[in-house]
Image (cartoon, rainbow, N blue to C red):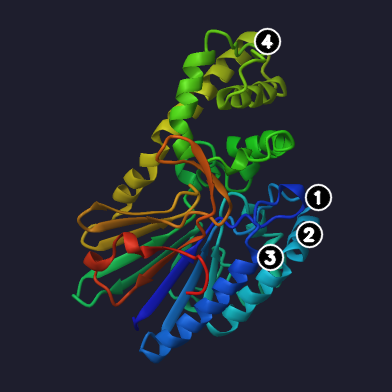
Amino acid sequence: MESLMLVAISDLHMSSGPLDDFQNDRLFVEFLQEMEKVFSEKEKEGEKINLLVLNGDILDLLEAPGDHFESKITGISSAHEAVFQRLNDLAKNYEVLYLRGNHDWDAFRPGNIDAARALFPHVKVPDDETPEETLIGHYGEGKYRIPYTDPDGKEVVIHLEHGNQYDEFNNFFYNDPRHPETSLGYLIVTEIVNFLEIFFPDLDNLDLMGLAVEVENRLKIVTEEFELDGRSPNLKERGIFTRISRAIRKIMDDSVSETAEQKLELKIHIARQLLRWLQSAGDTYLHQAGRMAEPGTNSIIIFGHTHREKAERVQENTMYINTGTWTRQIRRGESGNFISVNPRPYVTVHFDHPLGRIGPEAVNYYKGLI
């Protein structure tokens, strides 16, 4: 393969209406303009192939108003017209690939994908029917592999996917890819989070990784006073666990469980699963990256979904990179307090660098002109 530069971003969560979390239109348009200049310079230096991967959740159809896909996508395109224009302009001259996530899965349904492609006429929006010869790498089931040989003569495989199938709430790709709405994550966002954002606007900006300790502390405080059997919560306790418990109770009250005992058992199960997932989420993707390493090769595993950018070597021949998010985040600072940040990360991988030269600097932050 000719020399190549890969740039990856994810989790823009462009939507419309009051729940739209993407407020970086001007800077993202500027970023795309600057990236086109960088790609042009790389071409002059001999990097003949330059690739931008949109690694899922670029659109947020779960939080867009409207009952039908057409109305949702029309609203999003109107709200972020300049972004779509610049993406298409970049894709006229360079490879731009859009992979699916869990908030934009509806755009990849067989009946909707043509409308999504019309929104991005020059961006490649692949499905399992896309001819392989039209792609730089290999696509299947939401995953993209790019094999190449590095300057040291070692075989390297870059693996890109959104990554939501590796958490217990959003792994609908493995449960029923035809009906992602059956996942608990879909239900929580559409039925619970969207409603709670009216009262807690920052709810889906909270960093789940940093919240694990907070949830555990809240659990210890409220467990004796807060029942999961349908009774009202302690109104003095307005912590994260109380909000989550209210959400769990609403889900269960709307469920078809036949008895109160079944509802109680299911509520407690979901509460325990949620806490366990929060506590282990920081390591889940590192462990998954290690398992995905292909024998006899160097591997670069790139996920999104967690909203926490990272680049870390998980074993000698495997690098894990996460593309983070361009939405505002509330994270735990060094002092232990929660702070508001807007990191705007992007990942760069140069194929003419051996794996040993790829480290934390693969994650960059867009603060202005590159």
In x, y percent, where is residue 154? 21, 71
Kind of residue sitting beneath label 4? Arg
Mark in front: 2 vs 3 = 2
Crowding around mark 3 (Cα neighbors within 10 Å: few <14, some 14 to 19, many 20+) is some
- Tag 3: amino acid: Ala
Instruction: Kindly report which numbered mark, 4 or 1, lies closer to the viewer in this rendering.
Output: 4
Residue 31, horizontal then vertical, whole percent: 55, 72
Lateral position of residue 55 relative to residue 253, left or right: left
- Residue 253: quadrant of the picture: top right
Taking depth in this image into account, of 343 and 249 the one nearest to the observer is 343
The image's mark for residue 75 is 2
Instruction: Characterize the local packing of mark 2: few (<14), some (14-19) or many (20 or more) Cα atoms within 10 angstroms.
Output: some
Is residue 108 visible in this depiction of the protein? yes
- The residue positioned 55% from the left and 70% from the top of the image is 130
Q: Secondary structure at mark 4?
A: loop
Q: Earlier in the sequence, mark 4 or mark 2?
A: 2
Q: Is residue 10 above or below residue 270?
A: below
Q: Is residue 271 above or below residue 104?
A: above
Sequence-earlier tag: 1 or 3: 1
- Sequence-wise, the earlier of marks 2 and 1 is 1
The percent position of residue 257, horizontal first and vertical second, equals 66, 18
Question: Nearer the N terminus, badge 2 or badge 3?
Answer: 2
Q: State the count of labels.
A: 4
Name the amino acid type tagged 1.
Answer: Gly
Do callouts 2 and 1 mark residues in contact (Cβ within 8 Å)? yes
Q: Which residue is mark 4?
A: 231
